[in-house]
Amino acid sequence: MWKTFLTTFWLVFLAELGDKTQLATMLLVAQHKSPWVVFAGAAIALVFSSLLGVLFGSTIARFVPQNYIQSGAGVTFIIIGALLLFGKF
């Protein structure tokens, strides 16, 4: 159980560093000068976003084999990356 917890923590923590969400929260703090309010809003949003991922992931995992989910996620990331690269997203 702890291995799964720590793996999840570090994966999400590292994935969130420097992404659009972190940049947006920095911008909000700079604009509103309310770091704790921005922190609370961002933290709650991340918790709910993660909850949706867990709920949808556990539901999908019941019906779709894991290798299809991994392949689908990989293809989706490649498509999003290409769209970002070409300014279409």
Image (cartoon, helix red, strand yellow):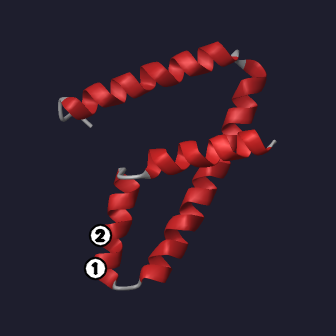
**Residue occupying the point 77% across, 45% down:** 2
- Image quadrant in which you'd find residue 65: top right
Q: Is residue 78 above or below residue 55?
A: above
Residue 29 in picture, x, y percent from top left: 35, 77
Element type where label 1 sits in the image:
helix
- Image quadrant in which you'd find residue 33: bottom left
Residue most extreme to the bottom: 33
Amino acid bearing label 2: Leu
Q: Nearer the viewer, residue 55 or 17?
A: 17
Looking at the figure, which quarter contains the N terminus? top right
Query: Viewed as shown, does residue 5 lie left or right of 30?
Result: right
**Mark 2 Cα-neighbour bin, 10 Å: few <14, some 14–19, many ≥20:** few
Amino acid bearing label 1: Gln
**Residue occupying the point 29% across, 69% down:** 27
Which numbered dot is residue 41? none
Which numbered dot is residue 27? 2
Give the number of marks: 2
Residue denoted by label 1: 31
Query: Viewed as shown, does residue 46 lie left or right of 30?
Result: right
Residue 53 in picture, x, y percent from top left: 63, 42
**Residue occupying the point 28% across, 79% down:** 31
- Image quadrant in which you'd find residue 62: top right
Looking at the figure, which quarter contains the C terminus? top left
